[in-house]
Image (tube, rainbow, N blue to C red):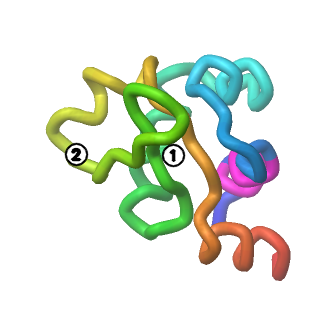
Amino acid sequence: MTDAEFDILDELYFVTSFRDLQQRTSLGANDLEQHLRDMLEQGLVRCFWPDPDTELAYEPTSFGAVRQDCFFLASKEGLLQHNTR
């Protein structure tokens, strides 16, 4: 887990929007997107769209188009890795 991924997970104990996550981590939109893609593929993060209650299955081809409107939450596995680092 990279330092940036650790910082992202630090913010995802509660459902958080992409925009809020970007502000809190000070990552650029493209960097944040790439880290989220990696974390979604590893099962460390869950994605919600169009609202914070509807989970969205990660689709690499369409994620970039909806990322700005998505919400994120650390998965159980993500929390476990975050807390054991």
**Mark on residue 60?**
2
In the shown orientation, is residue 9 left or right of residue 35?
right
Residue 7 rendering spot, x and y as whole percentages: 77, 47
Corner quadrant of residue 81: bottom right
Residue at 75% in and 31% down: 25
Closer to the camera, 74 or 55?
55
Task: Decide if residue 6 is on the left or right side of residue 48.
Answer: right
Amino acid type at circle 1 is His
Residue 40, horizontal then vertical, whole percent: 43, 56
Q: Which residue is mark 1?
A: 35
The label nearer to you, 2 versus 1, is: 2
Please name the residue shown 15% across and 39% down the image: 61
Contact flag, marks 2 and 1 (Cβ < 8 Å): no
Counting from the top left corner in percent of width and height, residue 3 is at: 74, 54
Q: What span is in magenta?
A: 5-10
Q: Is residue 34 above or below residue 22?
A: below
